[in-house]
Each structure stands twice: as C-alpha cells, then as structure tokens.
Amino acid sequence: MTPHAAPHCYALLPCAGTGSRAGTALPKQYAPLAGRALVDHTVQALLAVTRIDQVCVVLSPDDTHWPTHGAAAHPRLGVVRCGGVTRAESVFNGLLALAEQGAQAHDWVLVHDAARCLIEAEHVNTLIDACTPDAVGGLLAVPVPDTLKAEVDGRVQHTLPREHTWLAQTPQMFRWAALHQALLAAQASGFAGITDEASAIEAKGHAPRLVRGSTHNIKVTWPEDFALAEALIRSRS
C-alpha cells in the first residue's frame, strides 16, 4: 500500500468472553438464537456492509466452539486466536494481528460487540459516513431516555441529570494508529477504566464524535435479552 492509498476499513469483533451474566450453557456468543449462534448473526450483519474490507473475529486461544457454532467461512472473514482476559486486551491484540496482516496506521477499525447481533448495515454506513472525514473518529450511541439514579447499598443516593447523556453502542470507529496508541497507554495499568474504545481515546485528550444509532442495537447481556433479540430478528424476516 502506498502512503496515498485510500484507507481500508476493518471490523474487529472481540469474541473471547464468556458472558456469565447471560446464564447460558455455552459462552454467550455461541448460544442459540433464532436457529443460529448469536455471533453468527453479528458476523453476517457486518459482512453485509460492503464498505468493510475484512471482518476479523478475535477468539480466545483455547476456544473450542468455533467454527462448530461460529459463522460460516467467507472471503472477507478472518479469525485470530489472541483474545485476552479483558475486552480491551482482546482489542489491543486484535489490532496487532491486523497490522501483521497488512493494516496501516491510517486505516479505520470498527470495533463491534459480538453480542450486538441486531446491528444493521444502514447504521454502520451512517457511522462510516460521519467518521471518515473526522479527525478523531466516533461511535454509535443513543440519547438516554430514562431518569438516572446513583445508588449506594441498593438505595438511591441521588438523581443524575440525563441532559447531554448518551448510551454508548458499537461499532466504534477509529484510525488503527490512534486506537493502538490509546490502548498502549492503558496497557501498563491493565487497561483500568477502559470500558470501550472511546474511553481509551478520551483518555488521550480527544473527543469522539457521537453518531445517532438505533435502540434496536441492543447488547444481549441478560437471559431475557435473548427473547427480545429473537423477536426483533423474526420481525425483520
């Protein structure tokens, strides 16, 4: 790739967690959902975005469920077994794997939760359109609609203002070099306080762009989320 070549666009899917809160027999990403593994829905949704050059799934080194429960082979789908203990570590290792495969400093990386299986190409394209000309990058998010309460010992301590407050979603889209540098700076502390890619970028003094997403782009976390996700998937078909 020459220095002046157009940047590539990679999707990075950390898929090394266990999803203990979901209460599933298998790791959450492999739990059945509408006849397929949850992660299969996620991968296929990202592959539907033709502007993404490659979808890279980051597995745990000892993952025994892929490809038995994982997505089918696809020319734009790659798998690396370098997942870490935390999401941030998996993303950091995934970035290094992308670099080994040819990713350049100015290429874009869209990090997406494996458990957000309802993402739609329309919203990913909106994110790409908004971030491509942006100096920092950004993330899908939705404004907080509910009243927020701060809690101590199971009781309300006070009410938090919801104005100018958003719920972060994924994908989160940043240049390879910027995200690598941000995570590298947090590596010594074990990525403490880094709950998503935007928080790592923020820690470097940058302000990611908020791009309006969809309330349907839920992260399947709790047992009851599976029924909701399945209902939404079936309503689309």
Image (spheres, grey):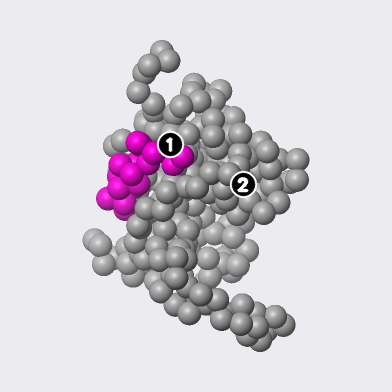
- Above or below — where is 4 with respect to 119? above
Magenta-drawn segment: 120-137
Q: Quadrant of the C terminus?
A: bottom left
User: Which residue: 44% across, 29% down?
Assistant: 107
User: Which residue: 50% across, 25% down?
Assistant: 105
What's the amino acid at mark 2? Ala
User: Which residue: 47% across, 47% down?
Assistant: 208
Measured as percent of width and height from the top left, residue 199 is found at: 57, 50
Measured as percent of width and height from the top left, residue 202 is found at: 57, 48
Callout 2: SS: helix
In front here: 25 or 184?
Answer: 184
Measured as percent of width and height from the top left, residue 52 is found at: 35, 36
Left or right of 146 in this view: 183: right
Callout 1: SS: loop
**Outermost residue to the top:** 2
Q: For the residues labelled 2 and 1, say whether their Cβ atoms are less than 8 Å apart.
A: no
Left or right of 151 in this view: 210: left
Measured as percent of width and height from the top left, residue 231 is found at: 33, 70
- Image quadrant assignment for residue 119: bottom left
Mark 2 Cα shell of 10 Å, populated few (<14), some (14-19), many (≥20): some
**Outermost residue to the bottom:** 155
Q: Earlier in the sequence, mark 2 or mark 1?
A: 1
> Residue 63's mark?
none
The residue that disc 1 covers is 135
Q: CA distance from mark 2 to mark 1?
A: 16 Å
- Above or below — where is 67 with respect to 27? above
User: Which residue: 39% across, 39% down?
Assistant: 134
In front here: 209 or 6?
Answer: 209
The residue that disc 2 covers is 203
Left or right of 191 in this view: 122: left
